[in-house]
Amino acid sequence: MPAATPSEPAPATCLHCGSPVPSGSVTRDFCCVGCEVVHGLLVEQGLTRYYQLAQGKTAPAPEPRKERAFAWLEPLVARAESMPGAVCALEVDVQGIHCAACVWLMNELFRRQRGGAGLTVDPALGKVRLQWRRGAFDVAEFLRGVEGFGYRFGPSRKRPERASLDLPIRLGICAALSMNVMLFSVSFYVGLTPEDGDVFGLFTRLSLWLSSAVVVVGGWPFFRSAIQGLRRGVLHLDLPIALGILLVFGMSLAQARGGRGDVAYFDTLNTFVTLMLVGRWLQQRVLERNRRFLLADDGAEGLFVRREEGARLATVRAAEVSDGDVLVIAPGDLVPVDAVLLDAGARVSTDWITGEPGERAVARGEALPAGAFNAGRVAVRLQAKQAFTDSPLVSLLRRAPEASGGAALHTRFWDRVSRRWVVTVLCVSALGLALWWPAGPDKALEVAVALLVVTCPCAIGIATPLAYELVQARLRRAGFFIRSTDLLDRLPRVRKVLFDKTGTLTLGRLELVDAGAVSGLSPATRDIAFDLVSRSNHPASRCLSGALAREGARFTPEARVAEHPGQGLELLRDGARWRLGRADWATESPGVDAWNAPSPGEDGEAAVSAARSPRAGRVDSAGGVQATGAGRVSRPGARVEVLLSGSGLAAGPVLSRDGVPVAFFQLRESVRPDARREVQSLQAEGREVWLISGDAPERVRDMADALGVPAGHTLGGQRPEDKAETVAKLDAADTLYLGDGVNDSLAFEQALCAGTPAIDRPVMPGKSDFFLLGEGLGAIREALRLSARLRHVVRRLLALAIGYNVVAVSVCLAGWMTPLRAAVAMPATSLATVLFTVWWLAASRERAAATPTPPLREVPA
């Protein structure tokens, strides 16, 4: 016998949310940086009771974004404080709330801030109502503090969907009434007859009155849907449900008025209506929770900007910006139109519009593109060079059109099922009526009604919504949140998976190539480096700050650090000038051979000598590394490995003392820990994987090589229009697109289905069919697998329903169906289909854990 293959160790679970830690993650304690940050805050601030209240229901936390704009908040607070009274009130939407622990956390943070008068949190809808004493409470400060825990606030736009308020109430009423009717019916089945006089009449009348209420309250959603379908010329599945309810009630009413309540179908009718409502509620429950998890998207209408209007500063909607307006862009604010900088200098980031990371310095008079963010620490003044109607953001922010073309193909299966079911049930009922008409109208009507009762579409009305709910709940635990009702019907058709690069396959932040560059520094030098980077919000500084903190670097509060835009950071200490930044600026001598610079005499950190010949590299005048050979460069106290090939290498900053290099930190884009494994697994299952990015083609090719994506499936330098055109050419109703920037917006509209991991950015979540939480990509493959399994289970359910209905129809046509038999058969088949659904989906989980996923087969349309 062959030796048993050792099984892989079970993945570690995140200390914050309990999700599996992606394979290859730097830490086995947390699934993502967001969870690590939030966990640290909860422990630091003594808020760990959060975990006791959460009871394992916490979702992965997005990484908190610093310096987020609150321009939308200013007019709302001003309006609230303009109202009379000592207490002001404001309602805002919140993203990320999902359980009672979130409510407790927000209330606890609110309690710790002075000036608050009251806080009401609605977790079901995702809304927060604040009350505070006028002039004694900083609303923006409180919201920023809460956002540090992974939440996000926005204007109050969420509204409860009509069905979310309507269905639970109808369901509760019908369930309560149905239980009473079933009790009355039991008395008929055990021997209560018309000969029992007043008791029989009372139970009959009560059954009739309660059933009438159930038909009116619970039947209305199906009546309305059936009428709307007939007006559009569509035989909707709700049509036989509505007809069955009306005919069964009509016949039962006739029997009751004739004094024969014991042969009426009141109990079966009530149970049927209630179960159909349960199925309808299951269909919407998880989807609404996922939608409410996010802020409501308002497109361009949700963007605000500060505009100079004479001596005052007004906050207006971006749509009101005209050519020539002077705008004030605070840190974190968006530039809504192409503009020119009026101040001396600024730092901007264009990652939202291009999808690529990086900040750059802008001088007075230089142009800033629409979609740039103020990445600096102070507000800057701009002059608009176009009206917002001419801004390139308008087309990217437009509302997504209704699904059409390939995205609508998934409906064919259910359309066919609905039409055939309606026609078959009506024909069989008509046949029963015709066959038994010679025996008398009463008997013929009884048979026809019995056929409508026992041929209930329980597999579609109850078990199928349950199957969808179970799959969606399982995907939520994996960090995959579905927003579109029909996504699980579309996913089995996916044969091509298209990835954007930056922020999608990468994490939108930098990472240190060699940890030895930090650990090899002396403690004193680490402290100086930490003082420099901890006072900067530059991506490189954030990366180094985390690495230095993990090595125990200490912060000096009185340190005074100067940030030179486009150059780096500078600190004077004990008569020495320390710099961290571009090599030519840090060393003050372009072309200095940093690898052979003399030692400054402190621990010999900067004594750089080649470990082998030829030298591995030298610092050039552009601030990067010139490769002159391959190899490792060593120095006393600091180990640096120069990677001459790899994905997304960034020119690393140099730490210097009095112009002499002390350390070099090679940085690169941080790739999602399981990206390579997931890409190769998708390809092994028979799916095409494409890499489509606006980044430089050579950088995209490097990433593709690192992940194993074929060169022919790699496209770089793509504009938003290019991406959309590429997706349109590739899509044959079989593409899944994953992107994070507004430059992916047009491509989203062309793909069969689209999703985003960027829930902290506007617009994209509102256009996506699903969104991801956490740093892993494994949930995409899990969703593809479960959707295929779901389709298989649903088709088995239909086969089971057909088999049951063949038997039931035969019994009815033979005239053997009675109210008692119908009362047993209908709930019994409903229970059987529910148990079948749960068992098959649970069995699929076990089989998936034990066997690899087979190659794909074509799924018929």
Image (cartoon, helix red, strand yellow):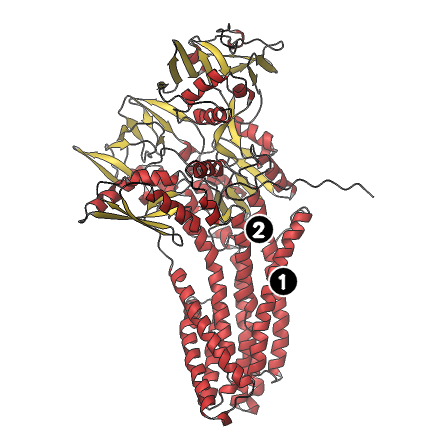
Q: Is residue 825 above or below residue 625?
A: below
Q: Amino acid at mark 1?
A: Arg
What residue is rendered at 44% in x and 55% in y? 288
Q: Is residue 744 visible?
A: yes
Where does the image place residue 309, in percent across and percent down from the top left?
A: 19, 35
The residue carrying mark 2 is 493
Where does the image place residue 766, in percent across and percent down from the top left?
A: 41, 47
Q: Amino acid at mark 2?
A: Arg
Question: Residue 796 has which mark?
Answer: 1
Classify residue 108 as left or right of residue 806.
left
What residue is rendered at 40% in x and 76% in y? 213
SS assignment at label 2: helix
Label 1 and label 2: CA atoms lie apart by 19 Å
Q: Residues within 10 Å of mark 2 (few under 14, many from 20)?
A: many
Frontmost residue, 197 versus 782: 197
Classify residue 619 as left or right of residue 399.
right
- As drawn, which residue projects farthest toward the right? 1
